[in-house]
Image (tube, rainbow, N blue to C red):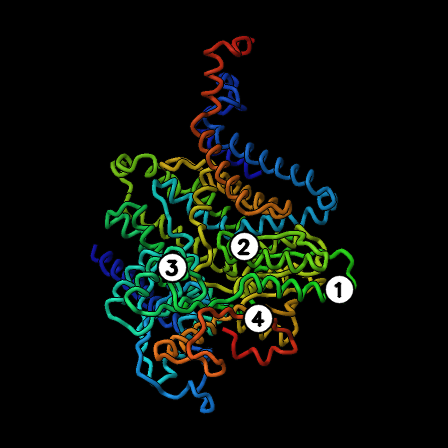
Amino acid sequence: MSVSSEEKVEAPGGHPPHTAPAVAKTSWWKDEAQEPMRRNLGLVGVLLALFAIGAFIRPDLYSNPDWVINNIMVILTQAAAIGVVTVGMTFVIIGGGIDLSVGALIALSGVWATTLATQSFGPVGMIFTAVAVGVGAGLVNGVLIAYGKLVPFIATLAMLVAARGLAAQISGKQTQISADQFINSLATTRIVGIPLLVIILLAVAGLGWVLLNRTTFGRRTVAIGGNAEAARLAGINVRGHTMLLYALSGLCCGIAAIMLTSLATSSQAAAAELYELDAIAAAIIGGTLLSGGRGTIIGSLFGVIVFSAITNLFAIANLPTEVQNMVKGAIIVVAVLLQQVRFSSVTQFARRHGLTRAKPQT
Amino acid sequence: MTNSIPDTSRRRLLFGGTAIAAGALLTACTSNEQTPTPAQTKGEDTSNPNAAAGKAVTIGFSAPAADHGWIAAITNNAKAQAGAYKDVTFKQVEAGKDAAAQRAALDTLIAEKPDVIVLLPHDGKELNAFGLKAMEAGIPVVNLDRAFPDALAYRLQIKGDNYGMGVAAGHYIGKALKAKNVASPVIGEIAGMDELELTQERSAGFKAALATYGFTVANRRAARFTADSGQKEAQNLLQALPKIDAIWNHDDDQGIGVLAAITAANRSEFFMVGGAGSKKAIEDIAADKTVLKATVTYSPSMASSAISLARLIAQGRGMSDLVELQVPKEVILASETITKENASTYLKLGF
C-alpha cells in the first residue's frame, strides 16, 4: 500500500505509464521515476531470500507459524529504534548533509532521561527530557552547520565526541537503571499483536513520509539537497531550513532514546554504539543519495529491516558476529554499486551491443 | 505594522522563555545523587601488622577513562584504599582515550618520581615499553589486570582470572543440570566484546568446563558489554532456541538488558548465570525473583588490593601472613561463584 503511494508521488515528475498510453513507450524497467519502486522491490526480494535461507537452515523453527510471526515481530522490534533514527538521517542526507552524532545523541538523551532526578518526574518528565535534549543537541548541530558554516561531517563528529563525554559525565560512567514501570512496559506492550515500538516506528515513518512528500518542508529539503544555491535563489531560507533538519534528526534521536531505554530497562553512555553508521548504511541501501537531493523514507525503512533481519538470521544460524559484519559491508557495497549502475543504463548497454535488439522492435 | 512589532516580540519572548525554562529544568535533571556504593577497601585492622603506618610513600595511578561500571569501580576503589592509609599520597594521572594518550600521561608521571606506579593499561602489549622504562628508572610497577608480555616490565602483576570465570560458570551450570538429570541440555552463551582476548579466554574456560560434563554450547552470541546490545543479542538467542536449559551471560552490566529481553519474551524455563558480580546482580540473586541464579566474580576489588600491595612494595615490607619478606610477583584472583546462599556476604563487594 505504502509502495503504491510512493509510485504516485514520483509519477508527476516522470511518465505515468497507466494513464497515458502515448508515453507508455518507456517500459517500467527503464522509467527513471520508477527507480525507488524497483529498489524497494529489490529489498523485499532480499528479505524473502533471507527468509528462504532461514527456512532452509532451521526448518524445525520455520515450520511453526506462531514462531515465524513472533520472529517477524522480533526483527521489527529490533529495527524500531534504529528505524526512527534513520528517518531523521534520511531527511538530513536528502538535505545534503550528514549526521554522525545520532548514536551519541541517543546515549545522551537516554542517560539524561534516566538520571534519578529526571525519573522522579515520572514518565512524562523522562520523555520530555529525552526529546528536549535530542532537539536541543540537534539544534546545536544545526546552528553550527547553518550559521557557523562548519562542514556537517566535522560539526556532527565534534558532537559525537562531546555528547558521549557529557553522557559519561552525567551518568558517572555507570549503567543507569530505569525504575519507571511505564517506560519499561513500552517494550513489552503489544496492540493487536503488534509491539508498541513497531507501531511507534510506523507512525514516525508515516509522518516522515507525509513531511517529505506532501509538504513544502519536504520539497524544500529535496531542493536544498539537490542544489543549495539554486534553492537560495528561488527564495528558500536555506540556512534556517538546514538548521531545522538537524533539529529533526535530534528529535528522532530523543524518541529512539526512550525506545532503547524501554528495551534495555536502562541507559548508559556507551549505548547505541555505531548507530550512526547503521542509520547511514540503511538510508543508502534504501536508495538515498549520499550527495543529497534524492531518497525515500520507505527505502530507508526497508534498509533498516534488511539489516535487522540479517542480524536475526545470523543468530538463528549460530554464526559469529565477525561474519555478519563482513556480510553487512558487502551488502552496502553492492547497494551503492547498483545505485551507480542503474537498470536503465544496463538495458541501454545491452541494446547498444545488440544483445536485446530484437526486443524493442517487437 | 505597529501591530506586527509587539506580535513578533511576544512570540520571541514566549519562545525564549520556554527555551530558558526547558534549559533550567533539564539542568536540574542531571543530578544523580544516590547513596554512593561503598568502595571496596580493607579497613584499619589493628591486629594486622601491615596496617601500622610505615614510611610515607607516593603511589602514582593510571587507569583508562571509564565508560563501563567496572572500570569506574577500579578507579574509585584505588582512590578509596589509598585514602584509608595515612602514609600514602595518591597521585592519579588521566589515561585518556587510548594507549598513546596513556603513555604520554605516564611519561610525565615518571618525571615526578613516585615511589611506585599502579596502572591498568589500555593494552598490556602496547604499554609494555613503559613498564620497562619505569622499572629501569627504579620505580616499581604494579600491573593491574592487563598483563605485560615482558616479565621485566613489572614488579607485581595482580589480575582476575578470565579463564577461571568461564570454568566457574561452566561448573555451576554443569552441576545444576546433572542434579536435574537433564540428558542433553540446550545451553546458550552471551559473550562480551568478541575482539577482546578476555572474552575469548572466558569462552574457552566455559567450553572446557562444560566438556567435563559432556555438554556443549548450543548458541553463542557476542554483545558489547552494554545493556542495549545485551538486550538485542538475548532477544535473538531466545528466538534461535525455543527451549533452553541454561544461559551464561559474561557481564552483569549487559545482563540488565539480557534480563529485560527474557522478561519481555516471557521465558522462564531455564536459569541464568551472570558474570563480574555487580551490585544489582547480587541483589537479584538474593531476591530470587528472576532467572538469574548465580554470578561468577571478576571483582574490581583487585584495585584496592593493588594499592595495598603497592604500598608494601614501596615500604619494602612483605605480606604479614606469608614467610617471605617481600610481596610476591604475581597475584591472580580466584573467580568465586555467588549464589542465593552466599549473596549476603558478597553484597559489599558488588559494584
Query: N-terminal of the two: label 1 or label 4?
Result: 1
Q: Residues within 10 Å of mark 1 (few under 14, many from 20)?
A: few
Q: Are marks 3 and 1 on the same chain?
A: no
Q: Are marks 2 and 4 on the same chain?
A: yes
Residue A285 in the figure: left or right of residue B135:
right
Residue A177 in the figure: left or right of residue B242:
left
State the residue position of label 1.
B178
Viewer-proximal residue among B277 and A234:
B277
State the residue position of label 3.
A164
Q: What amino acid type is highlighted by mark number 3? A: Arg
Q: Is residue A128 visible?
A: no
Q: What amino acid type is highlighted by mark number 4? A: Ala
Which residue is at a point 31% across and 68% down the rendered structure image?
B93
Q: Is residue B77 above or below residue B13?
A: below
Query: N-terminal of the two: label 2 or label 4?
Result: 2
| C-alpha gap between disc 2 and disc 4 | 23 Å
Judging from the image, what secondary structure is the residue with disc 1 in? helix
State the residue position of label 4.
B281
Q: Residues within 10 Å of mark 3 (few under 14, many from 20)?
A: many
| C-alpha gap between disc 2 and disc 1 | 26 Å
Query: N-terminal of the two: label 2 or label 1?
Result: 1
Q: Nearer the viewer, mark 2 or mark 3?
A: 2
Q: Nearer the viewer, mark 1 or mark 4?
A: 1
| C-alpha gap between disc 3 and disc 4 | 26 Å
Residue B331's label in the rendered image is none
| C-alpha gap between disc 2 and disc 3 | 28 Å
Q: What amino acid type is highlighted by mark number 2? A: Gln
State the residue position of label 2.
B200
| Percent of width and height locating residue B208 | 64, 57
